Structure formats: C-alpha cells, structure tokens
Image (tube, grey):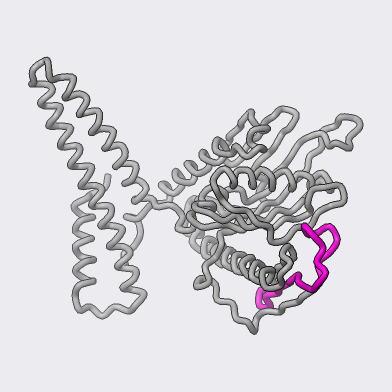
C-alpha cells in the first residue's frame, strides 16, 4: 500500500529544496524538478480519486436511507461516479508506472532475410506489406531508405522509416526473429518449409541525443543500380556513411537526390548508435534486477507464422491467434495489444515512480 501522507511530505520537501537557496547544479535541479512534477501529478490524481470515493459513500448513505422513489436516481449517480473513479485509477496507474519515454517516436524498421534463402526473402516482402498496411490504418507515413530485392521478388533487406504518433509504442516488440512455416510456390511435393526473417525496430533519435562528429564519418558516393532500388539512378546519388569509431555502416540509395539520401542515411546512423547506447545502459541496469521488461534481443525467436493452419503464435507471451490471413493484411491490433499490456505488467514488477530515488 502507498502511504500518501509520506508522498505528500516528500513533495513538500522537494518543493522546499527547489525554492530555497540550496546550491544545486543544473543536472541536480533538473532531476529534482522532474521528480517534483511526477509527485505533484500523482498527488493531484490521488486527491481526485479520494474525492470521488467520498462522494460515492455519501450517495450510498443517501440511497440506503432515502425514499423509495429516489433510489433509481441515486443508483445512476453512484454508477456514474464509479465509472469516473475507474478512469482516474487507470490514469493513476499510468502515472505510477509510466511508459517508455520513447513510445511516442517514429521508427526505423530494418528487415533482413535469414535462413531459407529465396523463401525468406519473399517473407521479408510479406512482412513489409503487413507493417505498411498497419501503418496506413493508423495514418502513419512509410518511406524506404534502402532496399535490396531478389530476381524472383521479395527482399534480402529493407530499411524504412515509419513516421507518426506512438509508432514505437506499437512496433517496438517486433524486434527479433520471425519464423514462417509454409509451402513455397516452387515446392512440387507440397512440403512445408521453415524460413526466418530478422526484424529490428529502432526509435528515431533526436539530434541532441546523438553527438556525431563530422571527423568521425567517412562518406562515399556511388551509383545505385541492379535490383536494389525502385529505380536505377544515372548519377552518383547513392550514399554510404561509415562511423569510424564504431564501424557502423549505413547506406541509402532510394532517392534520386544525393542530399536526401545523405539525410536519410544520417537518420539511420543516429538511430543505430542511439540504440546501441540504450542497450548498453539497459544492460548495466539489468545487473541489479531480478527481471526486466525485455531486451529486444534480435537473436530471440519471437513469433511463428504457420500458413497451413492459418495460425500465428507469439512465443514470448504464449499468444496464439487463428487469424494469420487477417494479421498479414495489416489487422495487427489483437497481436500487438497483449504485448503492450504485458510490458505494462512487467513495468509494475520492476517498480515505478515512487521506487526511484529523488536525489
């Protein structure tokens, strides 16, 4: 149980420190201000719930002691107040266990064919279509940064931007190995083949979060061609950027403009370096945890798509849906919402705002 008197006392102490002449450096003051803001929101929501509870108690007493003809009116008011309380309690829970600060961001989606050769490449195409249709249903924008296709269709690799509100919240759990079981169109004996595709979902990094020095970059220009792009450029507009300190290499050839390709490549580079740093920080934090929300390990086999049985199974939460055809057509809500709820449950186990140190 939360001792709200202690929470209010801590808020008073924080506000006292912030308004006093205490010598705080910039980082300390920012940290205290953030904590005070969090506690203030919690206290306001708790007080709102307490007020509704008191009103329900008063109405219930009037219902129990009131005249018969007013009982229906009292009950309607009580039901309305209880519904309001449920909304407030949900909001309080979100404040106590806040979501990932990156949830509202756009993402960079990377998909690569794994085991299974050409069949894996075909499945990359199917997954990209699935994500694109899901994005379209949410009003998000999809644009390709780089693509490498095969002679029979499908893609060895696709790197794309998906921009919109809360994209990372919905798609971040897609990182990992996706396994498909189906009969390839080239299979004459009707045998089921198993192939894999690796998916990575990176939150788009802000410029202020990733400091990349120009001297640390090697930029190569070349002419895109072959089956890799939507068209074959006739000028050296394709861009390859190497981040020398980390050895990270990105390339973009989908745009006809060298400037646009360079801008897209830099966004991908920033996201990869940002993700690597976030993983490093998360790994350090996890040493002191008994459990963690999840690392998004791309070597982990997260899901199986079984076409003969029209079945899709997410192995992380034991979820199985008999609607693979609908999911592949972009109807992913029943697949993604349980993962979002599971993440919230895991956050509760790890502790929330009131478990963090204020100094």
Residue 103 at x, y = what percent?
Answer: 49, 54
Taking the spot 23% from the left edge, 42% from the top edge, the residue there is 49
- Residue 237 drawn above or below residue 2: below
Q: With 281 as the anchor, is 231 left or right in this view?
A: right
- Looking at the figure, which quarter contains the C terminus? bottom left
- Residue 93 drawn above or below residue 38: above
Residue 147 at x, y = what percent?
Answer: 75, 58
Which of the 4 image quadrants contains residue 182? top right
- Looking at the figure, which quarter contains the N terminus? top left
- The residue furthest right is 188
Magenta: main secondary structure equals loop
Taking the spot 31% from the left edge, 62% from the top edge, the residue there is 35
Q: Which residues are magenta?
A: 223-247
Foreground residue among 332 and 191? 332
Taking the spot 48% from the left edge, 61% from the top edge, the residue there is 285
Quick check: is 73 in the magenta stretch? no
């Amino acid at each position: 149980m939360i001792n709200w008197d202690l929470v209010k006392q801590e808020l008073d102490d924080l506000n006292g420190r912030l308004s006093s002449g205490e010598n705080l450096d910039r980082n300390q003051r920012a940290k205290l201000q953030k904590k005070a803001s969090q506690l203030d929101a919690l206290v306001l929501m708790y007080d709102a719930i307490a007020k509704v509870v008191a009103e329900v108690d008063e109405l219930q007493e009037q219902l129990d002691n009131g005249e018969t003809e007013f009982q229906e009116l009292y009950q309607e008011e009580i039901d309305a107040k209880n519904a309001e309380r449920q909304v407030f309690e949900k909001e309080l829970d979100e404040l106590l266990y806040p979501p990932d600060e990156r949830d509202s961001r756009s993402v960079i989606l990377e998909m690569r064919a794994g085991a299974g050769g050409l069949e894996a490449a075909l499945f990359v195409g199917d997954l990209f279509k699935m994500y694109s249709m899901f994005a379209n249903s949410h009003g998000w924008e999809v644009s390709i940064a780089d693509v490498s296709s095969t002679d029979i269709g499908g893609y060895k690799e696709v790197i794309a931007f998906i921009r919109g509100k809360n994209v990372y919240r919905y798609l971040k759990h897609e990182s990992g190995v996706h396994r498909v079981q189906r009969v390839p169109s080239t299979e004459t004996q009707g045998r089921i083949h198993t192939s894999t595709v690796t998916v990575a979902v990176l939150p788009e990094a802000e410029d202020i979060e990733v400091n990349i020095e120009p001297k640390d970059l090697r930029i190569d220009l070349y002419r895109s061609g072959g089956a890799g792009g939507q068209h074959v450029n006739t000028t050296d507009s394709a861009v390859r950027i190497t981040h020398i300190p980390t050895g990270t290499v990105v390339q973009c050839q989908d745009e006809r403009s060298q400037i646009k390709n360079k801008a897209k490549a830099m966004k991908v580079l920033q996201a990869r370096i940002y993700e690597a740093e976030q993983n490093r920080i998360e790994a350090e934090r996890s040493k002191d945890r008994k459990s963690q929300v999840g690392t998004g390990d791309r070597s982990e086999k997260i899901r199986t798509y079984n076409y003969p049985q029209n079945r899709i199974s997410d192995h992380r939460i034991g979820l199985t849906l008999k609607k693979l055809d609908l999911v592949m057509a972009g109807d992913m809500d029943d697949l993604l919402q349980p993962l979002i709820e599971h993440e919230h449950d895991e956050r509760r186990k790890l502790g929330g705002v009131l478990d963090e140190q204020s100094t």
